[in-house]
Amino acid sequence: MTQEMTTVDRVRRLAEPVATGLDLDVYDVEMRSGTLRITLDARPGASGGLTLDVLALASRLIARDLDFEDPVPGRYTLEVTSPGLERPLRTPDHFRRAIGSLVAVRLRDTAGDERRVRGTLVDADDSGLVVLPDGAAADAPRRIEYEHVDRARTVFEWGPAERPTSPSRGRPRSTSRAARHSPPDPKGTP
């Protein structure tokens, strides 16, 4: 017995050859409130990132294929995007790609456990993930089954803001305005 292909599956099938041709992966496909969002990402280990020019080209090519095949019933808005710095983690593949990254996971129905877990993602398989939590609980990795995950994303840590240097720091002090603009004394006296 074959299972009927969903709209999202049909869109993914159309977008994957375009992404592959541009050395990208289809990270995610979502259909919500009349918006078809196709998220593309650079392939793991690729030397370059995802540029706006490549994203615009992918958008045009995917739109052309969607217009030709017409896999989405009714009207919709196409959005072709990148997953961004703090990318959502929804599938086992998303979690596997994020191994080694800092993640934030919100759990559902925790029954006494903490509802939020933040730490380094150390493993992921088809049924769950393992996080080495930050802080006091960092001594033991925590296994979380996907069925208990309400929402998860990678976390980008911004470094401390660079402090502006004052005009007098890092440079020798200047002399008075008159001394800077006066010709040197030929006798060497000030």
Image: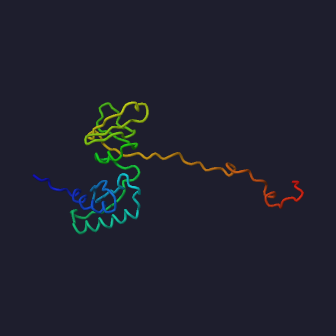
| Nearest the eye: 26 or 63 | 26
Display colour scheme:
rainbow
Please tell me how many numbered marks the rendered image carries: 0
Q: Relative to 5, is 104 on the left or the right? A: right
Question: Which residue occupies the extreme right position in the image?
Answer: 187
Measured along the vertical axis of the image, is residue 126 above or below residue 3? above
Q: Position of residue 14 (x, y in %)?
A: 25, 62
Residue 94's place in the image compared with 7, above or below, is above
Residue 152 in picture, x, y percent from top left = 34, 44
Residue 12: give x, y in percent of width and height: 25, 58
Q: Position of residue 36 (x, y in %)?
A: 28, 59
> Which quadrant is home to the C terminus?
bottom right
Left or right, residue 70 beside residue 158 = left
Q: Please state if 113 lies on the left or on the right of 189 as rendered.
A: left
Please name the residue shown 30% across and 34% down the image. Answer: 110
User: Residue at (83%, 61%) from the top-left corner?
Assistant: 183
Q: What residue is at 41 percent from the left and 56 percent from the top?
A: 47
Q: Is residue 170 above or below residue 76?
A: above
